[in-house]
Each structure stands twice: as C-alpha cells, then as structure tokens.
Image: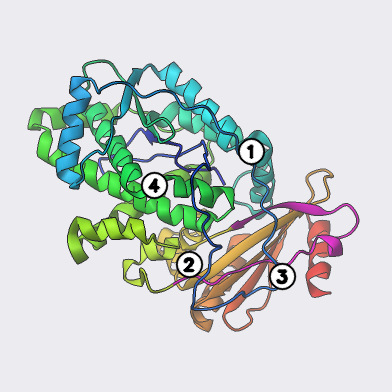
C-alpha cells in the first residue's frame, strides 16, 4: 500500500477544517523496539501456514541538524499548541519555510526511501487484479502526483524538523497546518512515532493504519481546537478562502488511492473524541501507550482496547500454481480497507454494513512474471456467520463479471479469489482446491 509511516508526516491541502490529510513516506528503524505480529488472545490463526515473507527494504537518510530556535511566529503557535494539547515540548525543534517546488523535491526523496518503485509496482499489480485501481495505473506516480498537488508541510521525526510552504509571515491556513504538525512533534517526543516505521518495515499494515489514525486524529482534533481558540473571525474567513482555492488531486490518482491516503483523519478524529469523552487528554495519552490494533477499533471505539483481531496467514499456493509462480506481495487488511474497496462499486452505507463484523483478513498475491499474470487469495474472518455471509454477498456483487470467485462461506470465514484473467483464475481455483 502507499506507505504513510512517520519519518515524514506531510500535511495535505484540506477541503474542510475537519478533513485535513497527511501521508508519510520515509522510514527509519533505529532505536525502535520490534512489535509482535498482529493477533490477540481472542483467537489464533484462521489460515494455516507461516506469515508470508515481508519484502520491504528501507533506506535511511542522514537527518539534518536542528535549528537553534524557532522563528517567533512559529514559536508562538508552538506555545499555543502546548496549551491545547496539555503537553510541553521536551527539546528544541527546527523549522523551515520553503517553496512548493522545494517541498515537492523533499517528498520525492522520501518516496524513494519509503515507497520505492519496485514495491509500488508489486502492490499495483495485485490491486489491479483485485479491481481496486484501473489497469495501467502507475501507483508510485499516482502517490507522487497526490503529494505534489496536496502537501503543504510535514514533520520529519529523524531531524526533529518542521517544513511548511510559506514565509516569515504565515497565513491563517499555514498556521493551522503548523499547529497540526507541531502536534506530531509533541506526539513523537512523548510517544515515539518511530513505532510506525517498525510496523511498516515488518508489513503489519493494519496496525500501521490503526496507529496512524490515532496519530492523525489527535493532530486534527488539536489543530481544530487551536483554530477555535486562536483565530479571529476575520482570520477564519481568510482561512475558508484559502481552503476553497485548493485544487483536487489530478486524475492520475485513482479514487481508491486518494481515499486510502486521506482515510485516517475523520475516523481518527472521531476515535480521539471518543477517548476524550472517556477521560480527557490523559485517555488519548494512554491510547498512544497502548495503541489500537485495527481500523475496526478506530471505527468502533467501544471495541478498544478489548477486541483484538485474529491472525490470518494465507497459505502459500505458489508451488501449486505451477512452475515459475512466485510471491508478489501480501497485506493485512481491515474494516477500513474493506469499506473503501466496496465503496468503489456500491453505496457507502451498504459497504459499511458489509464490512462490519470484521475479525481479521489478509490477501496474498503471486505472479509468473508473464504479461501481468496475477493470482490473489484473500482470507477473511468475521464475528458471526451472518457477518461472513453478508460480506460474501457483497464481494460477489463487487466482482461482477471480473475474473474472481467467492468460495462458499465456511462458518465465520470467507475466501475470495482474484485473478488477472480467466485462465489464471482457473489455475488458482485448482490450486486452492487441491
């Protein structure tokens, strides 16, 4: 998937105050305690076999030296964010105002390090076979195009540095963006956002998305509260004008990619608000210390922290597919991912209902390296047999006439097959039934 880990946390252009979006692109591992594989005490593996091989290789850039002190306009916003969030900065941050072209170059470097072209191509091949992005999509280019049109700032946790498009005099929207990124800096100093990098490096994508949703939800809630307390009515009018001037992402960015990149912010904010209702900011702090483990918990805060996902490991059908077939990629996917997938071909209310009751899922893809031949198996587990049946029906509708098959539900589990073409589907059906 397009990686959104936290060596860089860029802030994208927002079309509304509550739907600010960021992604991350550069990964660092140093000093991070390894996180155990996904799964909890509520159940064991649904599918047999070991976890598929994780094929992610991350490079690490040398961090830039922090500045001696923040410029006065940024220092003022930092003090205001400290008051809103209830945390004080432990050490100095660097800050830099740059042009749109400069930030584009920085983000491209981050993509080179955190989402290299070969990884993006593997993911795209699997997603094309699954029908979530159009045939011929250059996924790496799509993410790059999204960044270049939507990002206005980022926080770099390797260097402890803030970068934002602007000058010494910040507009209301730039100050709002700064408040968002300063919240990330506070999170990093208190809760170690580098944990996201380790989760990404070990291919624990559903845990990445859950922790990222908490991270971004907290930053959105804090920046909105900052704006409420610190922007004057005239500045809010200017803010609205700035936001209305932003252009949408280019057509090269498929809807699924755009929605996946921006997903964590509104659900994440709702999750944070639920935590605050339980116990104020200390409850949010405790959630960073004991992060949510699934997007199901983000979407249903009442399931946090007790309800843990099941571990799903799709068996390796590569050998059964025939000579030359090899692993392409795999991904743990959650309720949030399924919602976005199903919404491509059905109303959101129907997609949400079909994805509800998720208990765990993973897809695994193989290729023979010829003409894009791709086979994908998705194994899913559900809370009840009814949930499994509803998901199976939704997936059958999603597939339509495309090469794929929903196997008969087995209790609370459903297996879905996807293929690049009908011959590959026939081969895959033989492999999984043998």
Residue with the mark numbered 3:
49
First along the sequence among labels 3 and 1: 3
Label 2 – label 1 distance at C-alpha: 26 Å
First along the sequence among labels 4 and 1: 1
Residue with the mark numbered 1:
137
Residue at the left extreme of this rendering: 233
State which mark lies toward you, 4 or 1: 4
First along the sequence among labels 4 and 3: 3
Q: In the picture shown, does residue 169 fall above or below 378?
A: above
Label 4 – label 2 distance at C-alpha: 31 Å
The one of 38 and 67 positioned closer to us in this rendering: 67
Q: Secondary structure at mark 2?
A: helix
Label 4 – label 3 distance at C-alpha: 33 Å
Residue with the mark numbered 2:
355
Label 2 – label 3 distance at C-alpha: 25 Å
State which mark lies toward you, 3 or 1: 3
Residue with the mark numbered 4:
192
Q: Secondary structure at mark 4?
A: loop
Part of the protein shown in magenta: 308-331
Q: Is residue 100 magenta?
A: no
Residue 15 in view (yes/no): no
Q: Position of residue 89 (x, y in %)?
A: 24, 38
Q: Is residue 313 magenta?
A: yes
Label 3 – label 1 distance at C-alpha: 32 Å
Q: Residues within 10 Å of mark 1 (few under 14, many from 20)?
A: some
First along the sequence among labels 2 and 1: 1
């Amino acid at each position: 998937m397009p990686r959104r880990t936290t060596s860089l946390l860029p802030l994208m252009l927002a079309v509304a105050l509550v739907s600010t979006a960021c992604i991350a692109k550069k990964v660092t591992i140093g000093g991070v305690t390894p996180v155990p594989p996904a799964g909890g005490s509520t159940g064991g593996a649904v599918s047999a076999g070991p976890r598929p091989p994780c094929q992610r290789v991350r490079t690490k850039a040398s961090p830039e030296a922090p500045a001696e002190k923040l410029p006065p306009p940024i220092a003022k916003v930092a003090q205001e964010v400290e008051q809103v969030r209830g945390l004080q900065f432990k050490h100095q941050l660097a800050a830099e105002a740059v042009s749109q072209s400069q930030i584009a170059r920085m983000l491209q470097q981050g993509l080179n390090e955190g989402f290299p072209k070969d990884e993006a191509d593997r993911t795209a091949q699997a997603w094309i076979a699954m029908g979530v992005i159009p045939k011929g999509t250059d996924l790496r280019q799509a993410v790059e195009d999204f960044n270049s049109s939507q990002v206005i700032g980022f926080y770099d946790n390797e260097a402890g540095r803030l970068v934002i498009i602007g000058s010494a005099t910040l507009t209301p929207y730039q100050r709002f963006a700064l408040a968002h990124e300063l919240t990330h800096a506070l999170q990093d100093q208190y809760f170690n956002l580098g944990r996201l990098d380790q989760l990404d490096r070990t291919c624990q994508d559903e845990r990445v998305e859950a922790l990222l949703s908490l991270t971004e939800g907290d930053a959105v809630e804090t920046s909105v509260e900052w704006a409420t307390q610190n922007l004057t009515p005239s500045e809010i009018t200017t803010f609205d004008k700035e936001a209305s001037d932003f252009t949408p992402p280019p057509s090269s960015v498929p809807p699924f990619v755009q929605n996946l990149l921006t997903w964590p912010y509104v659900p994440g904010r709702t999750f944070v608000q639920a935590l605050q209702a339980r116990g104020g900011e200390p409850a949010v702090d405790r959630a960073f210390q004991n992060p949510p483990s699934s997007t199901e918990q983000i979407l249903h805060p009442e399931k946090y922290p007790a309800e843990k996902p099941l571990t799903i490991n799709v068996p390796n059908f590569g050998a059964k597919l025939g000579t030359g077939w090899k692993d392409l990629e795999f991904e743990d996917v959650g309720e949030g991912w399924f919602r976005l997938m199903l919404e491509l071909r059905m109303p959101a209310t129907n997609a949400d209902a079909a994805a509800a009751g998720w208990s765990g899922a993973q897809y695994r893809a193989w290729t023979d390296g010829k003409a894009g031949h791709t086979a994908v198996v998705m194994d899913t587990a559900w809370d009840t047999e009814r949930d499994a049946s509803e998901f199976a029906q939704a997936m059958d509708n999603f597939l339509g006439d495309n090469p794929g098959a929903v196997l008969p539900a087995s209790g609370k589990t459903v297996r879905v097959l996807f293929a690049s073409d009908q011959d590959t589907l026939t081969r895959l059906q033989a492999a999984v039934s043998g």
